[in-house]
């Protein structure tokens, strides 16, 4: 059990599968958006994006090994730039996780559509039922959810690679028929910035590091392992389908991989892909859910939110935080407009870019402020990694902002405005109830405890 009460139950393989599970969603649906950006050339956009995220992973590895506390980035930023800036980063991190919830409904909707048409209401009801069932699972021992997540993820990895290899080795597949870059360099470069959404999930590792049951110096393996698995699955999927169908066909179909399986006369493969795709949506939901609840838990530890979020049930789970995340998940799944899915990539890019930028700046500042803090894993060439991280995150923010339409800006501004009352409430409680609300910043100096 950790210093704060969370149980140490996660193996390295659990953490890899849970982090990668947050990144690997229903690719057979979202591949349409990738082709719209850069066609089959999006495989190179993914590889480029992954290479640019690699320095972030190494930075995250050092920061997590130094401060392996639930709440992750919020706590790092708070140590570097203060309690208020930490609160702001916490709010943006929550946006990343909250926005992921409706993707479960859309993913499952597309899966169901392969078997029989379902109304929008039926889809939302089914998605809500799944979320409610998952709420009860999140309140069980974490090792139970970790085992389930591992089974789902490694099965997804096997099925996706099997399907891609079958496509590539099929007689219908042709390298010459692939139209790599229909939108030229501009499409490729835009995809590099926007596809960062598909890698949001590696940041689950710091949220669960406090519950990891292996040496902190090995945390980098969880970051790189999840990044590698995600890149492999997505790139193989793109290559597999692009050699069989045209870019125009992808744009007009509903769910790509299963339909491609039907084209080559393997309906059974289409069924397997659909079933695993639906289960993949559950791994995504699980990963973001756990991340969101730990963010709330960590913020409460620092008195940025009510300490009710630190309440643990008999299984060592943050029950109140899980409840709030569950309510938000159901709300956004049921009431999010259909256009919500169009906002996700651009808003994700802005929010992720801001959070990652603040982490990089915190990494550089804390190396100067606290060189004495123990870093079981220390990234080499820290200044170079930081420089690459800053330039990349600024590029992501720029590309995402230029791609945002009016609706996306409205959503982002409203979300930021919604957070101001929570910040103001905490500030007022600091004066009226200093005993319970005096600002706290968890650090190695206090062993990550709320003293």
Image (tube, rainbow, N blue to C red):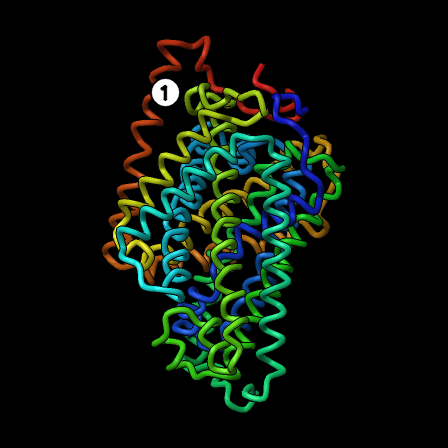
Q: Measuring from the top left, give residue 144's x and y in whole percent.
A: 62, 37
Taking depth in this image into account, of 283 and 370 the one nearest to the observer is 283
Identify the residue at image location x=40%, y=66%.
Answer: 114
Whole-percent x, y for residue 139 in the image: 52, 30
Above or below — where is 263 with respect to 275? below
Q: Is residue 446 above or below residue 223?
A: above
Q: Is residue 67 visible?
A: no
Rendering coords of residue 145 (x, y %): 58, 39
Image x and y of residue 351, in percent: 41, 48
> Which residue matches tag 1?
427
- Which is more toward the observer, 77 or 7? 7
* Secondary structure at numbered mark 1: helix
Camera sees residue 244: yes
Rendering quarter of residue 68: top right
Look at 51% across and 51% down and name the residue there: 200
Q: Is residue 9 above or below residue 394?
A: above
Which part of the image, by quadrant, shows the N terminus? top right
Quadrant location of the C terminus?
Answer: top right
């Amino acid at each position: 059990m950790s210093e704060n009460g969370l149980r140490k139950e996660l193996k390295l393989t659990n953490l890899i599968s849970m982090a990668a599970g947050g990144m690997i969603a229903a690719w057979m649906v979202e591949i349409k958006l990738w082709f719209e950006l850069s066609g089959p050339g999006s495989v190179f956009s993914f590889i480029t994006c992954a290479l640019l995220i690699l320095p972030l992973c190494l930075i995250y590895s050092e920061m997590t090994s130094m401060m392996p506390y639930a709440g992750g980035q919020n706590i790092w930023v708070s140590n570097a730039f203060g309690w208020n800036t930490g609160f702001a980063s916490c709010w943006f991190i929550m946006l990343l996780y909250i926005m992921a919830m409706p993707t479960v409904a859309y993913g499952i909707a597309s899966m169901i559509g392969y078997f029989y048409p379902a109304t929008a209401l039926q889809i939302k009801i089914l998605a809500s039922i799944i979320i409610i069932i998952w709420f009860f699972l999140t309140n069980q021992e974490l090792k139970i959810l970790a085992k389930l997540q591992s089974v789902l993820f490694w099965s997804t990895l096997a099925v996706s690679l099997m399907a891609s290899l079958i496509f590539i080795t099929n007689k219908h597949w042709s390298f010459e028929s692939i139209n790599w870059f229909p939108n030229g360099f501009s499409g490729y470069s835009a995809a590099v910035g926007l596809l960062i959404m598909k890698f949001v999930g590696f940041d689950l590792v710091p949220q669960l590091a406090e519950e990891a049951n292996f040496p902190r110096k090995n945390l980098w393996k969880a970051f790189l392992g999840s990044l590698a698995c995600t890149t492999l699955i997505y790139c193989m999927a793109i290559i597999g389908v692009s050699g069989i169908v045209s870019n125009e066909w992808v744009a007009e179909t509903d769910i790509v991989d299963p339909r491609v399986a039907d084209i080559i006369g393997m309906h059974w493969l289409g069924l397997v892909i659909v079933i695993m795709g639906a289960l993949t949506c559950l791994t995504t939901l699980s990963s973001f859910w756990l991340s969101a609840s730990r963010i709330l838990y960590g913020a409460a530890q620092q008195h940025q939110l009510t300490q009710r979020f630190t309440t643990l049930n008999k299984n060592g789970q943050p029950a109140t935080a899980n409840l709030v995340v569950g309510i938000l998940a159901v709300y956004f799944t049921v009431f999010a407009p259909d256009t919500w899915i169009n906002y996700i990539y651009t808003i994700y890019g802005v929010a992720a870019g801001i959070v990652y930028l603040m982490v990089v700046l915190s990494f550089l500042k804390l190396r100067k402020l606290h060189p004495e803090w123990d870093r079981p894993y220390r990234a080499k060439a820290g200044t170079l990694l930081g420089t690459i991280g800053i330039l990349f995150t600024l590029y992501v923010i720029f590309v995402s902002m230029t791609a945002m339409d009016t609706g996306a800006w409205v959503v982002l501004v409203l979300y930021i405005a919604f957070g101001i009352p929570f910040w103001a409430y905490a500030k007022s409680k600091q004066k009226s109830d200093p005993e319970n609300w005096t600002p706290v910043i968890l650090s190695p100096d206090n062993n990550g405890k709320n003293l």
